[in-house]
Image: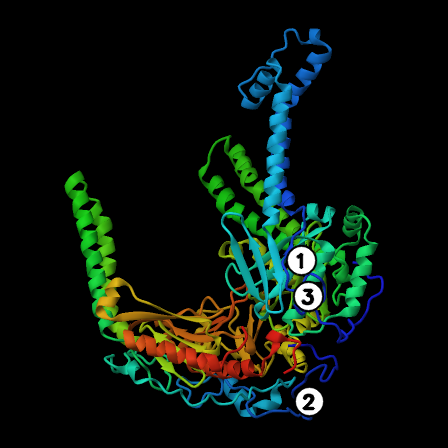
């Protein structure tokens, strides 16, 4: 934003200046124009909507961004052997139109095996300490760790079904979580690198994790539990699209 | 900040004579060059000087003793200064065994060895500037070579620490894009450092023309420099490097305002600490302590906790003052040049299009004076530990304190491609706002629980150029996120927010002090905003060509 040197409308007065013709009253306020308000709208909002543009004292440039492109064609490998149907929260949460691609159920199996092994290790360690020293407190620490693990395992299948990604025309949208829902849109052109990792156990089950890195540290989108082919196909697609949409930082 | 002859605009470089590497000076010719020969001494030599100082301080008694012993041995009878100190012991032993000559030789050998090692280090440290990259090689056994692509240069900083200024050296840092991606050329003679900076920025800008006239001027300047030390001394008097004198600063911070603003901030801190002391110390002591010693306990407790706090407050204020002293900000063809500093001068050049977010802030006590400060988010190549330090926080401040007019000028410099007629809208609605018919999307009434004080003020607005986030009831803040720089946008919702149909909007930009998170927006509004911002970011990024800012197209 830069300041306007010419003092047009030095003292904005909406009521007494009807001649302030707003240059672009097309979409003066994209956001709060609710088509179907779910809750009773406060009177202030309603008034603003009905009067719309003329009330804005200093006319801002209205956003008239082009609609997004057609969704890019998704390779068939992405949907092979994955969950069908995103698990939505019971009460209506965030929603987005489009096709969600999901992750493989093998992710849950792999996680169960890994966490199960960890559980055994913790239990054995606690038992060993208890057996050799006669102290009972290791069971408290071990029990706490195991409890956390068991709870996280219990909700893991639900979480896995809520993970999804959507390949839109200009960006990839990643969603996760049921209780704490999160949807991140990352433009293809912004991706700095795409990383596929799989640990030894992941390899046995044929799942891998795809990570997208942008210049913003917080964006860090990670899609765990993709099938091997799906991960590679997704990476190739993303890189191909990113090449054509490359921008500066 | 004396400006002898302020030129309003730098001349457009004439198009003749291109060097092989594309640079204008002899440094940017694609060949390997070495740094200033005093560099290793300066980097490692300080340690040597300190060690020497400690040794001498320890041996002062001993030296006096020896000297007196040489001239008036009878004075020493009865004086015993033998000690367990190994250095003293070694000196005693040397003197006692008449080995002064041999030991002196050994010391000399060590010094020579040191000098040789420094020379070797210097020999092996080289840099070169081509039209694509800046490369630095160093190390003798463990060689490292670092290459920074020029079109990803995020900024060029010229730092002149006080001792280096005395001998006319400067450190040039190229900020890369990524953690730990900085490339530092330390140290160069100040004149050369300025040349290198100019060349790097010119190459990075996409311009390939050599600037023959400026080259000639540089040579004349170099011939004029007779004595670097006297140069350094005048530098201390006149301030920042020569190049910065040419473009005139658009903002001048009067001394009184700088001190006043920081004093107010300091007073705020002291007040805060006082409150802490009262709550944390005075009240418990008066409640629970008893008897005559109660007052003594109280006094010691208050002094014990109060004095460090006051010192801390002074340190904060002094630090800010130091940074804001001799501040200047000026447009150059290669970006905004901000320089400041009392003892250590730092000159940062931020090329256009490298600013990812701008925030204009005002704390409560500044409001009567109409003072504002401006901070930015930008990609820097600092390592993770540097990012968390206070250094990064102060580096993000572009305008320490200024009036509305100053802020408008600075923001116009930082975001040069922002539409001009949005300025007043941003100021009236965004910074001062909310007025009637608020064009911002604010927190609905049911979000009162989350933002009881700033509910009407907290809001988001998308314009064709940027996303604006307005915050703060007492202290005002407005964040501007240019759409062309946005890295992503997220919407989140927790269980409580779901019950209220609220959601959190979060703009992803490069890390920095400006946050892009707004919680407790209406769910549908947040999702619609995310959609608009997402489309806007794509459209803006496609229009944007600032990463090679001077090239055509």
The residue that mark 3 highlights is B199
Q: Could you say whether the residue bearing mark 2 is in a helix, strand or loop?
A: loop
Q: Quadrant of the C terminus of chain A?
A: bottom right
Find residue B226 and report its horizontal and vertical position in percent: 82, 50
User: Of circles 2 and 1, which is in front?
Assistant: 1
Q: Could you say whether the residue bearing mark 1 is in a helix, strand or loop?
A: strand
Find residue B195 and report its horizontal and vertical position in percent: 71, 61
Q: Residues within 10 Å of mark 3 (few under 14, many from 20)?
A: many
Q: Are marks 3 and 2 in contact (CB under 8 Å)?
A: no
On residue A16, the disc is: 2
The image shows residue B204, relative to residue B136, as above or below, that is below
Of labels 3 and 1, earlier in sequence is 1
The residue that mark 1 highlights is B158
Q: Residue at x 24, y 71 (%)?
A: A206
Q: Residue at x 27, y 78 (%)?
A: A87
Q: Are marks 3 and 1 in contact (CB under 8 Å)?
A: no
B78 or B492: nearer the viewer: B78
Find residue B499 and report its horizontal and vertical position in percent: 35, 75
Q: Could you say whether the residue bearing mark 3 is in a helix, strand or loop?
A: helix
The image shows residue B361, relative to residue A19, as above or below, that is above
- Estimate the spatial distance between the alpha carbons at disc 2 and disc 1, rounded to whole Å: 53 Å
Residue B534 in the figure: left or right of residue B10: left
The image shows residue B97, relative to residue B294, as above or below, that is above
Q: Residues within 10 Å of mark 2 (few under 14, many from 20)?
A: few
Quarter of the rendering containing residue B174: bottom right
- Estimate the spatial distance between the alpha carbons at disc 3 and disc 2, rounded to whole Å: 56 Å
Quarter of the rendering containing residue B135: bottom right
């Amino acid at each position: 934003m830069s300041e306007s040197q010419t003092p047009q409308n030095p003292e904005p007065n909406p009521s007494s200046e009807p001649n302030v013709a707003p240059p672009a009253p097309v979409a003066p306020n994209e956001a709060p124009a609710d088509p179907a308000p779910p809750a009773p709208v406060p009177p202030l909002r309603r008034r603003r909507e009905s009067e719309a543009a003329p009330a804005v004292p200093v006319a801002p440039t209205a956003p008239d961004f082009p609609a997004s492109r057609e969704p890019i064609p998704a390779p068939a490998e992405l949907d092979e052997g994955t969950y069908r149907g995103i698990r939505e929260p019971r009460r209506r949460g965030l929603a987005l139109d489009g096709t969600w691609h999901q992750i493989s159920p093998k992710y849950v199996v792999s996680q169960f095996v890994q966490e199960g092994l960890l559980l055994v290790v913790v239990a054995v360690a606690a038992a060993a300490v208890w057996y050799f020293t006669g102290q009972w407190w290791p069971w408290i620490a071990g029990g706490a760790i195991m409890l956390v693990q068991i709870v996280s395992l219990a909700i893991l299948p639900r979480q896995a079904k809520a993970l999804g990604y959507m390949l839109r025309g200009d960006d990839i949208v990643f969603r996760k979580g049921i209780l704490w829902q999160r949807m991140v849109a990352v433009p293809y052109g912004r991706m700095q690198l795409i990383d596929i990792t799989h640990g030894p156990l992941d390899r046995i089950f044929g799942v891998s994790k795809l990570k997208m890195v942008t210049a913003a540290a917080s964006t860090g989108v990670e899609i765990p539990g993709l099938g091997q082919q799906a991960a590679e196909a997704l990476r190739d697609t993303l890189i191909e699209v990113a090449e054509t949409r490359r921008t500066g930082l | 900040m004396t400006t002898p002859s302020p030129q309003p605009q730098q001349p457009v470089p004439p198009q003749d004579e291109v060097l092989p590497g594309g640079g204008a000076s002899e440094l940017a010719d694609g060949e390997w060059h070495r740094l200033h020969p005093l560099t290793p001494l300066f980097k490692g030599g300080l340690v040597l000087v300190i060690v020497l100082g400690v040794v001498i301080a320890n041996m002062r008694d001993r030296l006096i003793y020896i000297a007196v012993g040489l001239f008036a041995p009878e004075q020493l009878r009865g004086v015993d200064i033998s000690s367990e100190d190994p250095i003293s012991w070694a000196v005693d032993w040397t003197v006692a065994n008449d080995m002064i000559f041999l030991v002196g030789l050994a010391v000399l050998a060590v010094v020579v060895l040191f000098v040789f090692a420094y020379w070797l280090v210097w020999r092996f440290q080289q840099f070169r500037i081509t039209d694509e990259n800046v490369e630095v090689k160093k190390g003798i056994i463990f060689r490292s070579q670092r290459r920074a692509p020029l079109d990803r240069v995020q900024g060029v900083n010229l730092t002149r620490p006080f001792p280096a200024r005395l001998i006319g050296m400067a450190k040039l840092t190229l900020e890369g894009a990524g953690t730990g991606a900085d490339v530092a050329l330390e140290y160069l003679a100040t004149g050369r450092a300025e040349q290198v900076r100019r060349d790097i920025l010119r190459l990075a800008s996409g311009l390939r023309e050599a600037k023959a006239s400026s080259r000639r001027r540089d040579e004349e300047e170099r011939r004029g420099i007779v004595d670097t030390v006297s140069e350094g001394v005048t530098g201390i008097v006149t301030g920042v490097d020569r190049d910065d004198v040419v473009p005139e600063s658009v903002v001048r911070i009067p001394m009184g305002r700088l001190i006043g603003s920081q004093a107010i901030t300091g007073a705020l801190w002291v007040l805060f600490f006082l409150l802490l002391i009262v709550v944390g110390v005075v009240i418990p002591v008066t409640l629970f302590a008893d008897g005559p010693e109660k007052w003594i306990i109280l006094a010691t407790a208050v002094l014990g906790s109060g004095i460090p706090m006051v010192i801390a407050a002074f340190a904060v204020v002094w630090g800010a003052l130091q940074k804001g002293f001799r501040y200047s900000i000026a447009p150059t063809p290669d970006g905004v040049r901000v320089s400041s500093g009392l003892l250590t001068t730092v000159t940062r050049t931020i090329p256009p299009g490298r600013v990812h977010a701008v925030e204009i802030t005002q704390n409560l006590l500044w409001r009567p004076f109409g003072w504002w400060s401006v901070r930015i988010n930008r990609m820097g190549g600092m390592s993770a530990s540097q990012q968390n330090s206070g250094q990064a926080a102060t580096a993000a401040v572009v305008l320490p304190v200024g009036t509305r007019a100053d802020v408008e000028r600075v923001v116009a410099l930082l975001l040069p491609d922002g539409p001009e007629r949005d300025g007043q809208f941003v100021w009236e609605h965004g910074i001062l706002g909310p007025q009637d018919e608020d064009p911002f999307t604010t927190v609905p009434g049911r979000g009162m629980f989350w933002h009881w004080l700033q509910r009407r003020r907290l809001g988001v607005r998308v314009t064709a150029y940027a996303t604006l986030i307005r915050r703060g009831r007492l202290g005002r803040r407005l964040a501007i996120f240019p759409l062309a720089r946005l890295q992503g946008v997220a919407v989140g919702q927790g269980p409580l927010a779901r019950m209220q149909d609220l959601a959190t909007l979060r703009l992803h930009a490069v890390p920095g002090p400006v946050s892009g998170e707004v919680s407790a927006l209406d769910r549908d509004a947040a999702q619609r905003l995310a959609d608009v911002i997402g489309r806007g970011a794509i459209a803006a990024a496609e229009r944007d060509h600032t990463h090679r800012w001077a090239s055509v197209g």
